[in-house]
Amino acid sequence: MANIRPFQIAVPESKLDRITHKLALTSLPTAYDAEDTWAHGVPLTKISELLDHWKTKFTWRDNQARLNRVLPQFITAIETEKFGTLNIHFVHQRAQGKGAGKKSIPLLFSHGWPGSFDEVSKVLPLLTKSQKEEDVVFDVVAPSLVNFGFSDGVTRAGFGFKQQAEVLNKLMLKLGYDKYNGDLADTGLPLVVQGGDIGMGISRMISLMYPEHCKACHTNFPRPMPPSGASEADKQPQTPFDKHGVTRNSWMESQGMGYWHLQRTKPQTIGYLLEDSPIGLLAWITEKLYDWSDAYAWTNDEILTWVSIYLFSTAGPAASVRIYKENAGDAVELVKKAMSQHIPDVLLGISRFHMEPVQPVRKEWCKNLGDLVFYNEHVVGGHFAAWEAPNELVTDLRDMFGPGGGAEGICGERSGVIKQ
């Protein structure tokens, strides 16, 4: 296709030398004597371990080669309404195997913060390959959001969820997924969007702005507003899963929101640390990986690869946190509508993972987000579902769109909506 070029990550040696130099000059704080050192932030022992691994064992070139080998990557120019032309980096893998071709579903996978396009790595082979004739398979597109990864950055204010949605909608159209794949009678099902964290907000914004193209949304990060009045469901005792979710919410509100307040109000201030200090960026991200996951056994290489993608990103790590500020102010009402209110004409699927730190108070509230055709709860996994629990996430997508699922035959009658 025109102006769509294969892409290989190739970080210049000068950038690697700069990181090596900075790591050699690192000064760490003194040890902090506390019963639960994680309650105060990332423990010195953990950062010291990661620093030593970074200096002596971690090889970016090996991890760069892995990304280039397992992820088919491309880059293309997208013209925006107010921010000029932006080069967008993305992973694109078409379905393979028995269910490929006309039966495959275009799936736009949007990452969050502090994730990246790499979050698709574990689910990509599961989504695009089938073992049985009846398996539903997907054509997967996983972009680097603007200001993230190897997509361009912007230097003017005002680039929030709405603008990210514009770029990704145009990307899918450019790839030939018009609704999102031309004549539905010939090509089967229209676009599905999937996302958690920031990716949820962008997926929901696409659902709100482009329902003529996007016909279904699946998220592992539902953020419904409470109903305006008490319903019969609200009078019933909470389920054990919802009670656990309230506990996670309470922890997040009291212990985990410092980053959000800073990035939402003063992103430029924290940006200096993230841009200039590899260890500062490492600590800032590592805290979230541990606090928001379900005791996932992060390897040192995994953590350092995630951090390195930010360090070597086109726009730089400081650019990635600006989106929190961009979704405040004048944009807040539109963002709230996209994230937390009812969106018609787009089928909705929800997967909840029990260690997600931001949970609906009641599962019934999720029905207020749209035409809910799929809902499932998992007692494994946390915020990074595609990385922590890839099999569970993919199974949910197959169940939602496969035989007997609420979104089976999405172009036809909506018979699978979960009633209030």
Image (cartoon, rainbow, N blue to C red):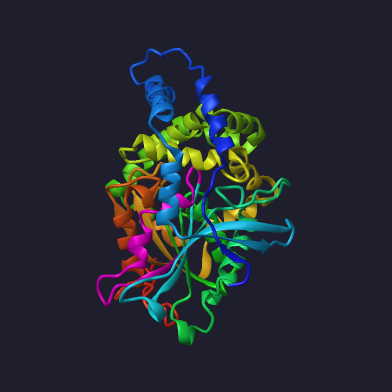
Task: Name the residue at the left extreme.
Answer: 132
Task: Answer with left or right where residue 150 lies relative to residue 49.
Answer: right
The image position of residue 348, as x and y in percent, is 44, 65
Pick the quarter of the image with the C terminus: bottom left
Seen at 27% across and 48% down, the residue is 379
Residue 164 vs 13, above or below: the answer is: below
The image position of residue 252, as x and y in percent, is 44, 36
Does the stretch in magenta take in 262?
no
Q: Nearer the viewer, residue 346 or 384?
A: 384
Does the stretch in magenta take in 114?
yes
Residue range (magenta): 113-140
Pick the quarter of the image with the N terminus: bottom right
The image position of residue 269, as x and y in percent, is 65, 30
Residue 245 vs 162, above or below: the answer is: above
Q: Nearer the viewer, residue 351 or 241?
A: 351
The quadrant where residue 89 appears:
bottom right
Q: Which of 259 and 371 is in front in this view?
A: 259
Q: Is residue 45 visible?
A: yes
Q: Nearer the viewer, residue 84 or 345?
A: 84
Seen at 67% across and 57% down, the residue is 86
Task: Name the residue at the front extreme.
Answer: 13
Tell me how many marks there are: 0
Q: Is residue 250 visible?
A: no
The image position of residue 93, as x and y in percent, is 44, 65
